[in-house]
């Protein structure tokens, strides 16, 4: 069983899955991060979280159009957490409150996990690490933009390196699945989630369980894929109960 930190183990496969989305100038990133202490030793979690929460990369050295608002990184993690929820990026309500999954999608996710809000927001038991820490803004049709690519390229490998106690990653949506599964991701999100048993039992640390986004936009998907509630959710709830006890 590999013990390589998850983010680093999958980084190259992830680059292959999303080449243009991942591409970032290391020189640009280094210039922005120059004031922060960078060395080869394992990152200190508290220091790293403080750096993330102070990050303004997408405003001050963006790859493309600057973030249209002040950055407000939303992340929850502690060294003792064994379960990690990895979604896409905050929406407007999460951006306004600074609390991850503080919206109807979060209510459905907590129902899937059978977790109350107190446990869900207990960072000592549950880490919440989206692929983009800040609300990325809206596209022309009013939908949420994809997570900022600067974010995972800058922070995620080191953050997961600082969290060796994570045993199970819930990879919600295509961006989290691309990062956490790399080449093991199937052709479509439905195929990836449908093959959850194979993916979760694969020889990797931490284990990864792919999930669809709990948004109301996926109501039709949930109706068409009744096996998700009938077969996957009972196993998910058992796993989660063991990891947060
Ligand atoms: S999205 Fe990520 S990289 Fe961009 S400003 Fe927020 S924390 Fe920094």
Image (cartoon, grey):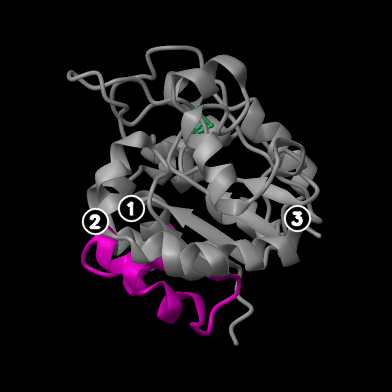
Q: Residue at x 50, y 62 (%)?
A: 233
Reply above or below: 149 against 56: below
Magenta-colored stretch includes residue 94: no
The nearer-to-camera label among 2 and 1 is: 2
For label 3, the residue is 81
Quick one: quadrant of the N terminus?
bottom right
Q: How many marks?
A: 3
Screen quadrant of the C terminus: bottom right
Given residues 23 and 112, the one toward you in this image is 112
- At x 68% / y 52%, what residue is drawn? 39
Left or right side of 53 for 177: left
> How far apart are the alpha carbons under marks 2 and 1?
19 Å
| Disc 3 crowd, CA 10 A, few/some/many (<14, 14-19, 20+) | many
Q: Is 81 in front, or is 155?
A: 81
- Left or right of residue 206, residue 182 in this image: left
Residue most toward the bottom?
Answer: 1
Spot occupied by residue 179 in the image (x, y as percentages of width and height): 42, 58
Q: Earlier in the sequence, mark 3 or mark 1?
A: 3
Q: Position of residue 151 (x, y in %)?
A: 47, 39
Left/right placement of residue 156 relative to residue 14 reads: right
Q: Which residue is mark 2?
A: 224
Residue named by callout 1: 174
Per the image, label 2 sits on a secondary structure element best described as helix
The residue segment tinted magenta is 179-207
Answer whether labels 3 and 1 touch (C-beta < 8 Å): no
């Amino acid at each position: 069983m590999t013990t390589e930190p998850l983010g680093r183990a999958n980084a190259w496969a992830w680059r292959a899955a999303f080449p243009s989305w991942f591409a970032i100038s290391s020189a640009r990133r280094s210039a922005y991060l120059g004031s922060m202490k960078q060395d080869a030793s394992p990152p200190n979690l508290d220091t790293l979280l403080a750096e993330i929460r102070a990050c303004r990369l997408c405003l001050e050295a963006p790859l493309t159009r600057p973030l249209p608002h002040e950055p407000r990184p939303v992340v929850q993690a502690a060294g003792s957490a064994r379960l990690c929820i990895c979604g896409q990026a905050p929406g407007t309500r999460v951006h306004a409150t600074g609390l991850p999954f503080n919206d109807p999608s979060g209510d459905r996710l907590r129902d899937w996990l059978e977790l109350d809000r107190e446990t869900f927001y207990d960072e000592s038991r549950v880490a919440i690490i989206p692929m983009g820490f800040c609300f990325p803004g809206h596209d022309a049709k009013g939908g949420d933009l994809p997570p900022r690519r600067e974010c995972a390229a800058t922070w995620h490998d080191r953050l997961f390196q600082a969290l060796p106690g994570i045993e199970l990653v819930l990879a919600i949506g295509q961006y989290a699945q691309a990062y956490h599964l790399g080449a093991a991701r199937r052709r479509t999100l439905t195929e990836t989630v449908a093959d959850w048993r194979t993916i979760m039992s694969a020889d990797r640390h931490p284990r990864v369980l792919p999930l669809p986004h709990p948004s109301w936009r996926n109501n039709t998907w949930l109706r068409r894929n009744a096996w998700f509630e009938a077969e996957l959710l009972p196993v998910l709830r058992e796993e989660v109960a063991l990891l947060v006890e």
